[in-house]
């Protein structure tokens, strides 16, 4: 799940090739038209929604298709939605097991955009590429899928990022709430209530079962990162008998309340900030946060808080304010490999150069060099509002924000708690999910991966998810968000053995990530 600032073994012999039986017919006859559809594969260029997509999708090893699903599962004969699907076919068709469906998280991240990176990062031409059709898809409303979630223009996003919601007075709260409601009103006007009502994980999980069937797989093989673990665990609860294998990396605990999740995530980012400060203090060059990690938060506050009233230059025609500085820092804390660039970015605060932190913030917002934004964060809000608990009591908002800032003081702007209702409080339709313990009787063994220093999805959530699903847990020592298929041999060997041969890691198996 993306950062929320109050509103990421031994080799085994190859198994014999498996013949995939035909997908089962759905129990609801009205859904047969979707389950029986045949995907029409073709070039991926028409599916590109970003500059990076246009480059990656030109590779002829990928082909793409559109999957039809009902917009509203309560009315399957009504309006339809279309999901974009990208595929790399198995390199060894004779040894093919089936399809490996992936989701990169968010919520709101494009699976089509992410798959080429997953392949280049840790899959390559190895066993997973040999034995699976590798599948990335854009969940409903996301990326190339239609109808798309749309709220703000590129120009409006620039304004949204610069919003100065630091006033805790009644007038300041009223102003912030008016801005939040205006955002929701724009989502309604540009997207439609009927779409917004049906973009939650409840519906996306049903879409995945139609995708499984359309790909010709009787059982689902799935790898989900971050929010993708919520999508995977929801699928496991809805369709336990249709699961072959689930890898859930960077877990969301399905039993955790929204309040507890926000506080835990803020604590996770403070832990990551502290780890960065310790690393920074040990480098041969002077650390911009000083040489005492225990004082790093105070030093950073002194560097960042002046940006509230006086932004600094951040490239041609742009200025870095407090919000973007915080977002840039959080973006870099997702992975310890970014520590060197983060150090230079924070050093820029002292010299009046916000270019590096602005570029990091742009990565989070998915803004390209031309100033165009994808709809990732609009989808993040829309899906989150359908999945999370609503907080409509300002006293509860105040308590949550107080606890969150106590958990992550490096994010504190120093103006006091702003007890304003967030965007979800003004959402036009009620949520379709709530925290609960999944009921997964008949689910085969699953594999959950949890990194000890994960800032966005703290380690304990993975422990709890593995227990809830009755599956295996791979503990990974390190400081980053998620670990599977990112080049660590220990982690990747465990994941590959499980996905290809359904071999679970031995109890107590642990891996360690490289230090920055």
Image (cartoon, grey):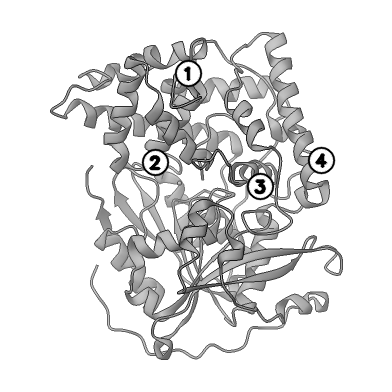
Q: Which mark is residue 189?
A: 4
Q: Which residue is mark 1?
A: 412
Across and down, in percent, residue 366 comes to 52, 43
User: Dot 2 surroundings within 10 Å: few (below 14), some, or many (20 or more)?
Assistant: many
Residues marked 4 and 1 touching at CB (< 8 Å) = no
Q: Which residue is mark 3?
A: 383
Q: CA gap, disc 3 to disc 4? A: 17 Å
User: Dot 1 surroundings within 10 Å: few (below 14), some, or many (20 or more)?
Assistant: many
Q: CA gap, disc 1 to disc 2? A: 19 Å
Q: CA gap, disc 2 to disc 3? A: 21 Å
Across and down, in percent, residue 257 comes to 59, 40
Q: Please state which of residues 152 and 241 is positioned toward the viewer in this rendering.
A: 152
Q: Name the element at disc 1.
A: loop
Q: Which mark is residue 334?
A: 2
Q: Please state which of residues 110 and 492 is positioned toward the viewer in this rendering.
A: 110
Give the mark, 2 or 4, whose residue is nearer the N terminus. 4
Residues marked 1 and 2 touching at CB (< 8 Å) = no
Q: CA gap, disc 2 to disc 4? A: 34 Å
What residue is rendered at 40% in x and 88% in y? 95
What residue is rendered at 20% in x and 19% in y? 291
């Amino acid at each position: 799940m993306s950062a929320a600032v109050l509103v990421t073994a031994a080799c085994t012999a190859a198994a014999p090739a498996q013949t995939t039986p035909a997908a089962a017919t759905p129990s609801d006859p009205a859904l047969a038209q979707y389950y029986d559809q045949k995907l029409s594969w073709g070039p991926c260029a028409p599916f590109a929604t970003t500059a990076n997509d246009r480059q990656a999708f030109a590779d002829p090893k990928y082909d793409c298709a559109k999957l039809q699903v009902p917009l509203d599962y309560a009315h399957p004969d009504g309006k339809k939605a279309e999901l974009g699907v990208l595929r790399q076919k198995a390199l060894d068709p004779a040894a093919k097991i089936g399809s490996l469906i992936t989701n990169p998280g968010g919520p709101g991240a494009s699976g089509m955009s992410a798959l080429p990176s997953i392949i280049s990062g840790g899959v390559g031409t190895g066993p997973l590429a040999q034995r699976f059709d590798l599948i990335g898809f854009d969940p409903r409303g996301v990326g190339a899928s239609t109808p798309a979630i749309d709220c703000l223009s590129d120009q409006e996003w620039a304004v949204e990022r610069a919003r100065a919601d630091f006033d805790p007075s009644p007038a300041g709260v009223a102003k912030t709430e008016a801005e939040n409601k205006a955002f929701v009103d724009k989502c309604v006007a540009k997207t439609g209530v009927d779409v917004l009502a049906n973009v939650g994980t409840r519906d996306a999980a049903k879409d995945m079962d139609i995708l499984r069937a359309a790909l010709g797989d009787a059982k689902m093989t799935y790898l989900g990162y971050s929010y993708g673990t919520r999508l995977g665990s929801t699928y496991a609860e809805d369709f336990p008998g249709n699961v072959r294998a689930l890898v859930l990396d960077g877990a969301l605990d399905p039993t955790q309340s929204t309040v507890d999740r926000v506080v835990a995530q803020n604590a996770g980012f403070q832990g990551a900030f502290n780890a960065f400060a310790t690393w920074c203090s040990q480098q041969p060059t002077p650390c911009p946060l000083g040489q005492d990690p225990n004082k790093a938060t105070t030093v950073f506050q002194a560097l960042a808080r002046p940006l509230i009233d006086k932004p600094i230059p951040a490239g041609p025609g742009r200025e870095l304010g407090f919000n973007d500085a915080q977002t840039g820092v959080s973006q870099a804390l997702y992975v310890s490999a970014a520590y060197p660039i983060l150090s230079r970015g924070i050093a820029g605060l002292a010299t009046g150069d916000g270019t590096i932190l602005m570029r990091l913030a742009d990565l989070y917002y998915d803004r390209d060099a031309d100033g165009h934004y994808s709809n990732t964060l609009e989808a993040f809000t829309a899906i989150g509002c359908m999945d999370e608990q609503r907080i409509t009591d300002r006293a509860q908002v105040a308590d949550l924000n107080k606890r969150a800032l106590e958990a992550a003081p490096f994010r504190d702007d120093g103006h006091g708690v702003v007890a304003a209702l967030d965007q979800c409080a003004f959402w036009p339709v009620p949520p379709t999910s709530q925290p609960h313990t999944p009921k997964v009787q008949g689910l085969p063994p699953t594999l959950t991966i949890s990194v000890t220093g994960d800032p966005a999805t703290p380690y304990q959530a993975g422990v709890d998810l593995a227990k809830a699903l009755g599956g295996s847990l791979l503990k990974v020592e390190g400081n980053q968000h998620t670990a599977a298929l990112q080049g660590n041999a220990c982690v990747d060997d465990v994941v590959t053995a499980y996905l290809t041969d359904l071999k679970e890691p031995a109890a107590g198996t642990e891996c360690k990530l490289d230090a920055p």
